[in-house]
Amino acid sequence: MKRFVLLSFIAVIFASCTSTNHGELVGVRKNSKSFYQPDPYGMVFVPMGSYTMGVGDQDISSSYTATARTISVSSFYMDETEITNNEYREFVYYVRDSILRRLLSEVDEELLIKDEQNGDFEDGDELYPLNWKKKIDWRSEDEGYREKLEEMYIPRPERFYGRKEIDARKLMYKYFWIDLHAAARKDFREGADYRNASFADRPQGMTDRSLYIHDETVNVYPDTLSWIHDYSYSFNDPLTETYFWHPSYDHYPVVGVNWNQARAFCVWRTNKLRSFNMRQRNGIIPAEFRLPTEAEWEWAARGGNNLNPYPWGGPYTRNSRGCLLANFKPLRGNYAADGGNTTVIVGHYKPNDWGLYDMAGNVAEWTSSAYDPLSYNVTWDMNPEYVYNAEADEDPIMKRKVIRGGSWKDIAHFIKVNTRTYEYQDTAKCYIGFRCVQSYLGRMKGDDPRKMSRVY
């Protein structure tokens, strides 16, 4: 009986190792279950679709920068509100703490993770992972420890009433990105165009990916002085002093953030989620967070109402009861008529039909698209996007990025879904914020691979 059981067990093992596809093409079998992209926290799903971009109302400014054309957009997720002060503050605190931990690691090595996997790095190498489980001892009596802490504060001669405050000028975030457009377009060293050449036909030396990997270092702290320098003879000092850090404004949209800072935030948010997934060891890498393209933003703002000028679908800025439907500059400058003199708490007004709040007014929003008055005439009709990565020393006209949605200080024309304008990528304003999107990996929600016609 024991021998029979043993032989049966061996037979079962060999049977499980035997291919059951009968030599047919069935694809790679994975041990993991089918992947279904989860809804990111605080985001809503925007389905794929087609619409007439640029149409909404007459061109009052006669700028002719939004030529009507039919385009299609793939599915994606979008933040239901603009990024708030409290959410952006998490990014600032991360940068602060990571810089401080790197400094303190010179006197406390336990703030770094030095295990066998990371053993090849030299002492002081910035590639050592940070040990976030180790707490910072803010009240340490160690002289070397306190000297490192002191480096993060504003120098003593610059302190107001002797207050020890973190020096915002030191909050620099370094990140990397790959210029896929340059990689697809040409080789930097040769200068030739190889768009139509196969990978094997390209010249030797073109496989060095480092040519297209760039690093950026940006200061992440918002420009709080934008509340003052954006206007002449206007008393906005209280907002400059409190708007970003005070808990009263936790759920107000973050402003004073330029395009470079908004893009850095998206990279940090992506890395944060991917780090969590790696710690969970599920092996699934989610799509990256990014700024929306101009076409995605308009599609999302319309909420399925294709030919209407406003996100709520109607031609007017008031509802049937006479209530204003967005935070903008109504009438001849009665800012308070809509419920707020400047910004208001996010989600104060009703969302559009896809559940997105404040797609008109409150604060204008950065997009990933570079601004050109004629870009509608040169981009493709599926997921159109016009991009240009301007260097810091380039002409300002090359740094223009599209902003959409209008703000609390704009008249009704600028809060229409088809109105486009721009601001410079290295300029921060007290009326511009942003929100993130994440591409949907697939066609539409609800697609079930088990429902395909062939299932092995």
Image (spheres, helix red, strand yellow):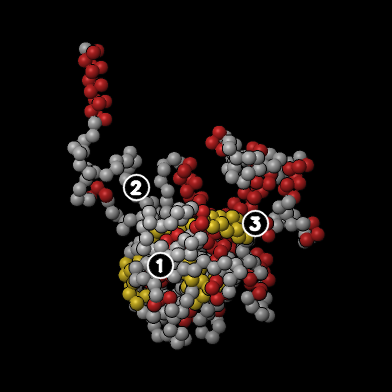
**Residue tagged by mark 3?**
171
Q: Sequence-wise, which precedes: disc 1 or disc 3?
A: 3
> 64 or 390, which is in the foreground?
390
Query: Which amino acid, by three-letter code, is at mark 3?
Result: Leu
Mark 2 lies on residue: 35
Residue 296 is tagged as 1
Q: Residues within 10 Å of mark 3 (few under 14, many from 20)?
A: many
Tell me the kind of residue under disc 1: Glu
Inter-mark Cα distance, 3 to 2: 37 Å
Left or right for 52, reference 118: left
Tag 1 near tag 2, CB within 8 Å: no
Q: Earlier in the sequence, mark 3 or mark 2?
A: 2
Which badge, 1 or 2, comes first in the chain's sequence? 2
| Placement of 23 over or under 50, stated as above or below | above
Q: Please state which amino acid type lies under the numbered disc 2.
A: Phe
Q: Residue at x 36, y 63 (%)?
A: 196
Q: Taking 207 as reference, is 397 above or below it?
A: below
* Residue 254 visible within the image: no
Q: Secondary structure at mark 3?
A: loop
Residue at image point 31% right, 58% down: 443
